[in-house]
Image (cartoon, rainbow, N blue to C red):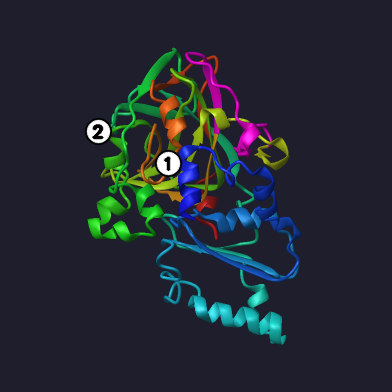
Amino acid sequence: MIRYIFEGLRGRGTLIDNDEYFRQISPRFEDIEIPTFVYGAWDDIFGPAALRIHRRISMPDGRFQVIINEGYHGSPGSQLGRPDGPPRLDVLQRAWFDKWLKGIDNGIDRYGPVTLQQQNGGWHTLETYPRPEAVPQRFYLDAEPSGFAAHTSLDGSLGAAAPRGRTEHRLHRRPGLLKSPTTSRLMSGMTAALGTSGLKDSRYFERGALTFTSAAATEPWVISGPLNLHLRTRANGAEAFWVVSVTDVAPDGFSRMLAEGALLTSRRAVDEAKSVRGVDGDYLSPWHPTGKGQKMPVEPGVSTTLDIDLTEVDAMIKTGHRLRVVISAASLPRYIPSIPELWASRHGQSVVLDPDQPSYLVAPVVIGARAGAA
C-alpha cells in the first residue's frame, strides 16, 4: 500500500498506470440483483455516495433501500434511534436480514425506499432521489460584490443573470489545513476537537478563495440532486487544479459546506455515456475518465471551460440564508495532486467571468411550499 501511495505522488507506476486493473475493480451497480441496503452520511469521507448508488440501481418490491443522515465516516448511525428518526442502524440491519434471509414479513421492504435526514432540515421519506419536482436552475457567477463575504479573496455574487462585463480573477494556492470542512470529511470528523468552527464552518478556508454569494432567500427552497459547476478558466502553466464547494450561509455568516468536488484542467474530458444532463442540456453530473490515456493538453494562457462534478445534496435553504460557491486552488490534505501535476500548475490560474461564455452552477431546485414536503 505504501508503494502505491508513493506511485500516486510520483504520478506514475505499475498500478496507477494500469487502466485494465481499474476497469476490473470498478463497481457495476447496474448488475446488482440481490436485495441491497445502503447506508451513508452527508459528511462521509466518500461523500453521499449512497445516493449516487441509488441512481444506478433499479430493483422492484422494496429490494433496494438507502438511508443517509448527518454525520461522518467515524460516527455511523449517530442520528438513528432518536424519537424523530428511523430506528437504530443495528435494528434496521436485523430487520433487513430477517426479511430477505428468513422470509419474515416485517415491513422493511416498504420502508423508504429513500430515507434521508435533509441538510438543514428533518427526516424525509422519498419514493426516488433526486426529488422529481426539482428543476435544474442556473446560478451565474458575477464579480459584482455580494456584500456578505469581505473575508474572502473575492466577494462576488451568485444570481439569475450572466455578468455584464468581462473580468478575470487570479487564484492563489492556499492549503486548507485542519480548519476546514473538507478536512473534517477526510479525517472522519476527528477535527471536532478543534470546535464547531473547524468542523463545519467554511469561513476560515474561504479566506484564500474566490466566493460567489446569492441574495438572501425570501422563502424556503430546496436543492435536491447532483450539482455541476460550469467554469471558464485560464491556466498560466501546463496544469491547474480546481477545488470547489457549495455552502449554505446563515444570516450570522456561518458558512456550512453542502457539496464539494475537484478537477485538474487536464482531466476535463467527459464521458457522455456515464454523464447525466438536465432536460435543457446542462450537465448535472459530468463523468470524467481518469485513465492514463485520458488526459487532455493544457495550453498556457488559453481560456478553457470545465464542468466540475460536485457531490449530491438534499438541502433546505431557509428564509434569510444564502447559497455560496467557493473556488480555490488547493485543499490539503483533502485533495493531493501528484508532484508533477503540482509542479506543472505552479504558474498560477484564474477564473474568467465572461458574459459571452458565462460560468454558472447548475442545481436542481424546489421552490416555495413544496420545498418542505416529505
- What residue lies at 40% left-to-right and 65% top-to-bottom? 74
Q: Which of the image's four quarters has the C terminus?
A: bottom right
Q: Which residue is identified by label 2?
A: 151
In terms of sequence position, does the residue under pointer 1 or pointer 2 come before the other? 2
Query: Where residue 3 sits in the image (x, y, percent)?
Result: 48, 50
Q: Amino acid at mark 1?
A: Ile
Of tags 1 and 2, the one toward the viewer is: 1
- What residue lies at 64% left-to-right and 49% top-to-bottom? 22
Q: Secondary structure at mark 1?
A: loop
Q: Amino acid at mark 2?
A: His
**As drawn, is 178 to the left or to the right of 142?**
left
Query: Where residue 348 sits in the image (x, y, percent)?
Result: 39, 22
**As drawn, is 3 to the left or to the right of 65?**
left
Does 204 appear above or below 106? above
Q: Is residue 106 visible?
A: no
Quarter occupied by residue 122: bottom left
Main secondary structure type of the part rendered in magenta: loop
Which one is nearer the viewer's eye here, 71 or 132? 71
Q: Is residue 280 magenta?
A: yes
Which one is nearer the viewer's eye here, 220 or 44? 44
Q: Secondary structure at mark 2?
A: loop
The span picked out in magenta is 279-307
Query: Where residue 192 sits in the image (x, y, percent)?
Result: 28, 59
Q: Which residue is identified by label 1?
A: 336
Q: Distance of mark 1 from mark 2, alpha carbons?
A: 25 Å
Which one is nearer the viewer's eye here, 237 or 248? 237
Q: Is residue 349 visible?
A: yes
Q: Is the residue marked by circle 2 packed among few (<14), some (14-19), or many (20+) residues within 10 Å?
A: some
